[in-house]
Image: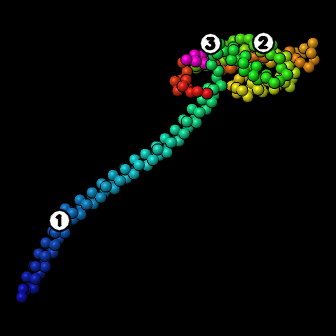
């Protein structure tokens, strides 16, 4: 049987060996695993941030695509109201629109004549104006103007002049300018707009 001092030495030696093994285990097994776990958590946080940004971008992209589609539809809708020349002439189309607006009304269109073309900033569009002479009562005239606006919301009427007609007290002599937005060069419209069929 070993002596108490020898037992103490074995105990101390065992404690030193156990401490050394514990140190080795911590140094070579636990610490690398903790460092690896910390790196994995950092990578996971970075990936989560990227994933959140990607999800946000996907949500934003679908919203932007929807807004772009709505804007294109609105542009197509407005572009449908910008007349194109008929046989290289805008007057024929404008005269037809005015006669359509007057159809069925007690309005007599006497003349539709070129007034002028006004330049606009931006360079793609101009304002084409015609001078309209007609005979009509007040209510049919209002209906004519309402019909013009309904046909083309981008049409404007200005310089309205109403004078009494000495030969017919039910009808007045009416002169006004009607204006439409037109393309400076219809062939040079935006490519995707030129392919649109109203």
Asked if residue 175 can be seen in this view, the reply is no
Distance CA(mark 2)–CA(mark 3):
20 Å
How many marks the image carries: the answer is 3
For the record, the magenta segment spans 183-187
Asked if residue 112 can be seen in this view, the reply is yes
- Magenta highlight on residue 90: no
Secondary structure of the residue carrying tag 1 is helix
Instruction: In this rendered view, identify the residue nearer to me: 6 or 100.
Output: 100
Q: Quadrant of the N terminus?
A: bottom left
Instruction: In this rendered view, identify the residue nearer to me: 191 or 1.
Output: 191
**Res. 88 mark:** 3
The structure residue drawn at horizontal position 21% and vertical position 63%, both measured from the top left corner, is 29
For the residues carrying marks 3 and 1, which lies nearer the camera in this image?
3
Secondary structure of the residue carrying tag 2 is strand
Q: Identify the residue under disc 2.
A: 111
| Sequence-first tag of 3 and 1 | 1
| Residue 38 x %, y % | 31, 57
**Res. 24 mark:** 1
Question: Dot 3: within a 10 Å radius of its alpha carbon, few (fewer than 14), some, or many (20 or more) residues?
Answer: few
Q: Quadrant of the C terminus?
A: top right
The structure residue drawn at horizontal position 74% and vertical position 26%, both measured from the top left corner, is 149
Give the left or right position of residue 149, taking residue 33 as reference. Answer: right
């Amino acid at each position: 049987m070993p002596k108490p001092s020898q037992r103490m030495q074995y105990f101390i030696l065992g404690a030193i060996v156990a401490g050394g093994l514990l140190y080795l285990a911590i140094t070579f097994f636990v610490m690398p695993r903790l460092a690896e776990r910390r790196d994995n958590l950092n990578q996971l946080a970075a990936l989560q941030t990227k994933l959140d940004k990607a999800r946000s971008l996907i949500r934003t992209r679908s919203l932007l695509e929807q807004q772009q589609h709505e804007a294109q539809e609105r542009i197509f809708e407005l572009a449908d109201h910008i007349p194109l020349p008929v046989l290289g002439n805008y007057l024929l189309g404008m005269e037809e629109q005015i006669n359509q607006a007057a159809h069925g009304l007690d309005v007599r269109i006497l003349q539709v004549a070129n007034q002028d073309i006004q330049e606009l900033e931006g360079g793609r569009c101009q304002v084409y104006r015609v001078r309209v002479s007609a005979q009509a009562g007040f209510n049919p005239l209002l209906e004519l103007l309402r019909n013009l606006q309904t046909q083309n919301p981008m049409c404007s009427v200005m310089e309205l002049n109403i004078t009494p007609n000495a030969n017919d007290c039910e009808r007045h002599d009416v002169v006004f300018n009607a204006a439409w937005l037109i393309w400076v060069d219809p062939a040079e419209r935006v490519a995707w707009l030129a392919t649109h069929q109203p």
